[in-house]
Amino acid sequence: MIKQLHGNSELLHYIVNSGFVPGARLPSLNELSDELGVSIGKLREQLEGARVLGLVAARPRRGIECNSYSFTPAARASLMFGLATNERLFREFSELRNGIESAFWQPAVLALTAADKQDLKQYVSLAWHKLQQSRIQIPHQEHRAFHLTIFRRLDNLFATGLLEAYWDAYEAVELNLYADYDYLTEVWSYHERIAGAIEKGLVDEARALNEEHLLLLRIRGVSRNNLPQDSEAELTTNVRSKA
């Protein structure tokens, strides 16, 4: 049994020692205070910490419920704080994300179902539809969904947690808002070829295409110099508001 839990939180120890399962409802704070001998004020602080980590959810009329474990909330919270102090840290996290995708590519792709592969093709179609409108739309949601779908069957909560946090960071530094048409068409040309290779079972070819296309973001960069001038003053503020 791990003894040290989030600053020796009595609440987290209680959850672990009681064997609560996802969806289980915890006693009220008043009941927990009596049982654990901890003040309600301290329990509120511990509850907020557990909520930020995604371990519990507190809802009106439903009380406190245990969540399934996910690494994403903890990774996201730490990452957003880092970006709020220096949004250029995104480049370092982006390099980590690229390494994760490459390292886990084969088991992730091999685990995909026929329906998953169809989803990849659907995201490509939706993206091209947006890009071919008279008023072009940036297919960010399709971009995020495309990559996360490739890893949706990966049996590694920490890898998938970091990949999910990456896309939150991508939005925080506003790369989902600013892109030129040539960049977008090149990205989705790669996505189309990746989806085709995955559908044909060409795992290594798909990985090579993915690694080529990951270089596009590095070339594009994430500095303020790549953003419209009127967005520069807002960038750090926007990142901090999401921390």
Image (cartoon, helix red, strand yellow):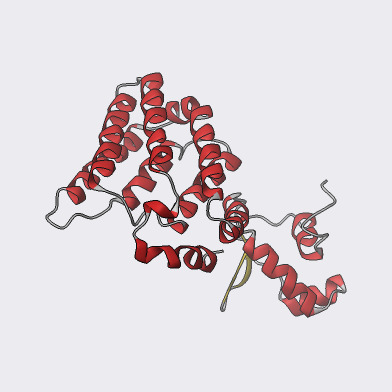
In depth, the one of 53 and 239 nearer the eye is: 239
In depth, the one of 72 and 85 nearer the eye is: 85
Task: Classify residue 189 by image quadrant.
Answer: top left
Number of dots carrying numbers = 0
Q: Give the answer, above or below, for where 191 lies relative to 51.
A: above
In depth, the one of 182 and 108 nearer the eye is: 182
Can residue 196 be seen in the rendering of this structure?
yes
Q: Give the answer, above or below, for where 78 lies relative to 238.
A: above
- Which percent across, then down, holds residue 119? 31, 40
Task: Give the residue displayed 57% in from the left and 51% down from the top.
Answer: 72
Task: Give the residue displayed 35% in from the left and 21% down from the top.
Answer: 201
Can residue 122 be seen in the rendering of this structure?
no
Task: Give the residue displayed 85% in from the left and 74% down from the top.
Answer: 38
- Which percent across, then down, holds residue 235? 45, 63
Give left or right: position of 31 versus 178.
Answer: right
Task: Classify residue 31 by image quadrant.
Answer: bottom right
- Which percent across, then down, holds residue 132? 15, 48
Give left or right: position of 125 versus 155.
Answer: left
Task: Give the residue displayed 76% in from the left and 55% down from the top.
Answer: 16
Give left or right: position of 241 versus 196.
Answer: right
Q: Quadrant of the C terminus?
A: bottom right
Q: Give the answer, above or below, for where 46 lies relative to 227.
A: below
Q: Give the answer, above or below, for where 96 lies relative to 25.
A: above
